[in-house]
Each structure stands twice: as structure tokens, then as C-alpha cells.
Image (spheres, rainbow, N blue to C red):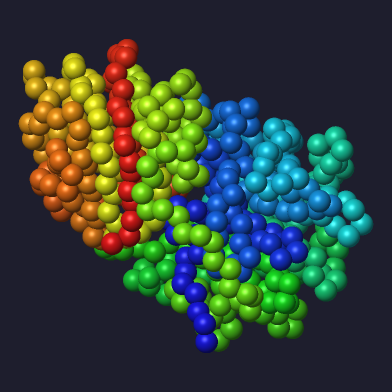
């Protein structure tokens, strides 16, 4: 029996939503404070995915200025109706949780997507779209029950008709369901389907941590009442204990293949080195079948596994992505992101062809700002990153190099800097907003090689002034500071390049010849 390996999207790709158009499958995930927002993927076999682009790739669509870490773009839903793709999501604007729901549309999933259609009277988070057989469209999300909360974080799912022509909600709001698991909090992530005469409402409960779960209800009427499935939760791993290799399973969406199989995508994490999730919440795939009108996930086991039988679809692999980016294109690869919406012309692939140029900005990596940074997700427990940089700091505060980032208060910076009339390569650990110098070596080089190797939670840092001649900067640094379990929040670790003048104006820049990331 042919099998596949989970996760199908490794690394920080949470809150997956999926739709099928003929023999093609499309999936989106959350992106929080990173820009461009909402990566979108394409598959033919549900196992192999290639990124098409980002749904929100223009500042006019996504203004993340001053958006705190782990805020920004929350769970997105993708749907296809009458030749049009729809993506609806929540923009959590501020630290206080102020939020706005909107949707965008496109004829081609690779874009361009429209500017946002804002829904000012749509409360809550995790909105979803449903198109009924009579042509009506609906939005649903969560909110506090109108009669008040019966316990902490008690929420309900509401539904309202959407006027697609005028991009606004119309008619009454209906309370659909407040979940299957009373006292288990945070009813959210709703998705609605009509299957064999029933409306099925699939939601997440228990929060996105260890107690996460998937529950379901059904009704013969779209507005209810909804019947609770007696097998709820239909999927969770909280009963398996914290030592199980896959944890916090939840927030699911489902799809039927052209061959009549049913599959579920969901988020989960793979802790390692203890209860630490540097990779964040990832996207997993699991089969289910219908029994007596209800879904049974992974029959006989009821859990998500790292290895499962493949879908009954022709295998369709995409060309492999290069492990090394030589920056020879005029555009950054789709794996790269900025922190918040990029402001100013601080990066270039054309000023020096074949190099990524990062201009020093006053903004620091330790600020809730838009620093001179480009980065990609950490996607493996064991990995190696290498790059080479041409940069000559001339005064105090000018610095550039590589950063391993959880957020502005938890990070490692391997930076080339000017200090006390000399240049040094140093490793700075930032934890809970406090910085500690782990290592520093004097070095004077016009071309500096940087390498990071991680084996589990042991992170090792090396540098060199010529190719493949490495000197140890620090070994066995504790990588758990890159986990949300230490740093808080909802995102996974990033690996990137940065340049900063630390609060002052500067004309300096750093040129990166190439960047390599690979699993080891």
C-alpha cells in the first residue's frame, strides 16, 4: 500500500482551508503579521503542494503597520462559486484584539485578487463562506452569545446572508450552535457544507493549544436547530498525552475528491526536545468516511498519523524547489516574507544583479516595526542554513547578518557589527526582551560566510572569511526560545536576513550573494 508522510505543509502553515475545482485542489493558511499575507497552494493529489503565490500581496490589500506579533491575518477560508474564488479572513488589528472581517475575490487563484470588501457588522474571528443550492451566499463566524457567556471564552457560531452584488451582510443574524463540549472553550473556525440533504457545521473547540479539537453538528435547515454529533469530538489528540508526536490537532476543513473519497485538512504541531513547538502549527491530512450520516476520522484509529495510505488519486509531484536561492530573479521567491507591510525601498534584487541588497533601516529587529528583513519559515527539526554577506560596518549601530526569529522579544541574531573601533561577529540571544551576548569574535572581512545548524533544540553557529572554512562562534544554544511554548503567541520560527542602523540614519547596505536552507 502506498503511503504519504504528514505534515503535507511542514512549518508554520496553520488554519488550513481547502476547496476543489474539478481535479485541482487549492488551500490557504494563516499568515499573522507577515507580508505578503495568506499563502495559497495548489495540488492534484492532496499530498504534493506547490505555492501559487499569496492572496494578499499588495499594501492596498494589507496594511500591517504597527500590528503586534501574532496578530494580523487569522484563519482564512477559500471557496469557489460560479467561476470565482473567494477568500474570507479576519484582520486582528491591535494588541487589544480589535478585529475586522473582509473577503477578496479572484478569477485565477494565482491572482490578482481584489482589494478587500470589508464587513463592518461581522463580529468575531475565523469567518467562512457558504453558497447554498438556491444561489444565496452566507457568512459565518464566532461571537459571544447574545444572552451572555456561561463560562470563560464561551462563544457561539452565527450566520447571516451575504449580498454578493453589494458586498454587505443583509437580513437577520442567526445563532447556530455554541459547540458540543460545554465548558470546553473557544468555539471558532466554522465551516458549513450541504451533504445528502443535511447542513453540516464543522467547528474547532478547546483553543488552539493542547486541548484543541474538531466537532460537528447537522441540521435539515440552514438556520437550525443543529443536532450535536454524539461522537464528538470527531478528532482530537488531547487524550493521547503530551508525549505523543502530534499534538493540538484541530481547526479542520473537508473536501471530497473526484473519486468520492473524503479527506480532512487540519492544523497540528510536532513538539520536539520536550513540549516545544518551534515549527509552529502545521497542516496535516487525514481521511474520513461517512457512517450513519456522520464522519468517522481515520477509521479504526481516530487520530492523525505521521504516515497514512495515500488518497486514491494519481500521484502528481511538482518540480523540486532549489535548496539555494542565488537571488538571480528580479522577484523574491514565494518562500520569502517581510515583517509587516514593507515601507520604503529598503531591499533590491536589481541594484546589484545576483545579490539581495538590504539597506540599513533605523528600525531594529527588537521593535514592533517593519525592519529591513526578509525571512522564510523553519520547516524541519534538523536543518542547516548558510549564506554569504558583503558588508562593512563603519560606525556603532550598523549591523547586518542572520536572525532566527520567533518575535521581537525572542530571537538569535548572528550579526556583523562595529564596536569599540573594531568589527566583530557576535551572537546575541534575546529572551523575554532581555539580551545576552553568547559569543563575540573580532573579524575584519569584506565577505563573510554565516552558517547555522540545528539538531533538535541544539542550535550551532559558525562563520568564515572564505568558503567552507568554518570557525565556531557558539554551539548548543538553547533553541527552545524559538517555540511559542516559551515565547507565547501563535506563529512558528523564521530564519532570515536583516540589516539595521539601530535608530539612526545610514546610507549603508549589506549584499547577500546566496541563501541556502536544507534539512539535515
Among the 4 quarters of the image, the one containing residue 442: top left
Give the quarter of the figure containing the C terminus: bottom left
Measuring from the top left, give residue 335's x and y in whole percent.
Answer: 46, 46
Kindly give the residue lying farthest to the top in the view shown.
505
What residue sits 50% from the left and 79% below the top?
A: 3
Among the 4 quarters of the image, the one containing residue 503: top left
What residue sits 63% from the left and 75% below the top?
A: 314
Measuring from the top left, give residue 178's x and y in whole percent.
Answer: 67, 58
- The relative height of residue 499 versus residue 6 in the rendered view (above or below) is above
Measuring from the top left, give residue 288's x and y in whole percent.
Answer: 63, 77
Q: Is residue 217 left or right of residue 433?
A: right
Q: Is residue 504 left or right of residue 38?
A: left
What residue sits 71% from the left and 66% below the top?
A: 23
In the foreground, 230 or 27: 27
- The relative height of residue 348 versus residue 461 in the rendered view (above or below) is above
Q: Is residue 471 left or right of residue 37?
A: left
Q: Is residue 206 among the parts visible in the rendering?
A: no
Q: Is residue 493 left or right of residue 274?
A: right
In the foreground, 187 or 300: 300
Q: Is residue 341 among the parts visible in the rendering?
A: yes
Amino acid at each position: 500500500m502506498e503511503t504519504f508522510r504528514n505534515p503535507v505543509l511542514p512549518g508554520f502553515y496553520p488554519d488550513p482551508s481547502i476547496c476543489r475545482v474539478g481535479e485541482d485542489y487549492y488551500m490557504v493558511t494563516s499568515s499573522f503579521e507577515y507580508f505578503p499575507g495568506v499563502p495559497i497552494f495548489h495540488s492534484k493529489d492532496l499530498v504534493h503542494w506547490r505555492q501559487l503565490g499569496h492572496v494578499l500581496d499588495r499594501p492596498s490589500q494589507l496594511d500591517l503597520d504597527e500590528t503586534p506579533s501574532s496578530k494580523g491575518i487569522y484563519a482564512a477560508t477559500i471557496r469557489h462559486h460560479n467561476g470565482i474564488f473567494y477568500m474570507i479572513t479576519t484582520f486582528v488589528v491591535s494588541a487589544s484584539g480589535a478585529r475586522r472581517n473582509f473577503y477578496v475575490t479572484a478569477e485565477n487563484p494565482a491572482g490578482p485578487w481584489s482589494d478587500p470588501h470589508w464587513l463592518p457588522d461581522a463580529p468575531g474571528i475565523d469567518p467562512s463562506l457558504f453558497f447554498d443550492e438556491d444561489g444565496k451566499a452566507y457568512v459565518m463566524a464566532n461571537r459571544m452569545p447574545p444572552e451572555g457567556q456561561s463560562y470563560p471564552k464561551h462563544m457561539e457560531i452565527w450566520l447571516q446572508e451575504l449580498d454578493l452584488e453589494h458586498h454587505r451582510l443583509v437580513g437577520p443574524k442567526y445563532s447556530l450552535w455554541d459547540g458540543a463540549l460545554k465548558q470546553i472553550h473557544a468555539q471558532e473556525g466554522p465551516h458549513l457544507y450541504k451533504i445528502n440533504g443535511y447542513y453540516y457545521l464543522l467547528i474547532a473547540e478547546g483553543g488552539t493549544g493542547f486541548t484543541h479539537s474538531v466537532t460537528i453538528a447537522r441540521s435539515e435547515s440552514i438556520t437550525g436547530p443543529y443536532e450535536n454529533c454524539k461522537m464528538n469530538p470527531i478528532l482530537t489528540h488531547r487524550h493521547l498525552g503530551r508525549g505523543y508526536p502530534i499534538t493540538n490537532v484541530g481547526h479542520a476543513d473537508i473536501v471530497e475528491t473526484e473519486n468520492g473519497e473524503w479527506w480532512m485538512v487540519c492544523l497540528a504541531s510536532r513538539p520536539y526536545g520536550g513540549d516545544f513547538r518551534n515549527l509552529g502549527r502545521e497542516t496535516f491530512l487525514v481521511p474520513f468516511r461517512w457512517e450513519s450520516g456522520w464522519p468517522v476520522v481515520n477509521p479504526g484509529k481516530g487520530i492523525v498519523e505521521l504516515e497514512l495510505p495515500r488518497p486514491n488519486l494519481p500521484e502528481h509531484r511538482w518540480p523540486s524547489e532549489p535548496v539555494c536561492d542565488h537571488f538571480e530573479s528580479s522577484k523574491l521567491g514565494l518562500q520569502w516574507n517581510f515583517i509587516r507591510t514593507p515601507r520604503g525601498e529598503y531591499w533590491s534584487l536589481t541594484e546589484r544583479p545576483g545579490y539581495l541588497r538590504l539597506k540599513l533601516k533605523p528600525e531594529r529587529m527588537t521593535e514592533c516595526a517593519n525592519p529591513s528583513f526578509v525571512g522564510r519559515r523553519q520547516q524541519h527539526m534538523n536543518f542547516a542554513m548558510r549564506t554569504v554577506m558583503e558588508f562593512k560596518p563603519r560606525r556603532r549601530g550598523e549591523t547586518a547578518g542572520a536572525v532566527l526569529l520567533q518575535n521581537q522579544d525572542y530571537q538569535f541574531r548572528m550579526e556583523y557589527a562595529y564596536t569599540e573601533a573594531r568589527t566583530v561577529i557576535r551572537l546575541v540571544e534575546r529572551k523575554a526582551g532581555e539580551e545576552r551576548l553568547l559569543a563575540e569574535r573580532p573579524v575584519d572581512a569584506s565577505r563573510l560566510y554565516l552558517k547555522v545548524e540545528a539538531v533538535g533544540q541544539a542550535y550551532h553557529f559558525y562563520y568564515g572569511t572564505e568558503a567552507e572554512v568554518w570557525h565556531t562562534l557558539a554551539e548548543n544554544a538553547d533553541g527552545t526560545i524559538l517555540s511559542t511554548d516559551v515565547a507565547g503567541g501563535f506563529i512558528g520560527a523564521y530564519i532570515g536576513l536583516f540589516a539595521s542602523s539601530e535608530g539612526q540614519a545610514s546610507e549603508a547596505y549589506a549584499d547577500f550573494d546566496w541563501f541556502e536552507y536544507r534539512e539535515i
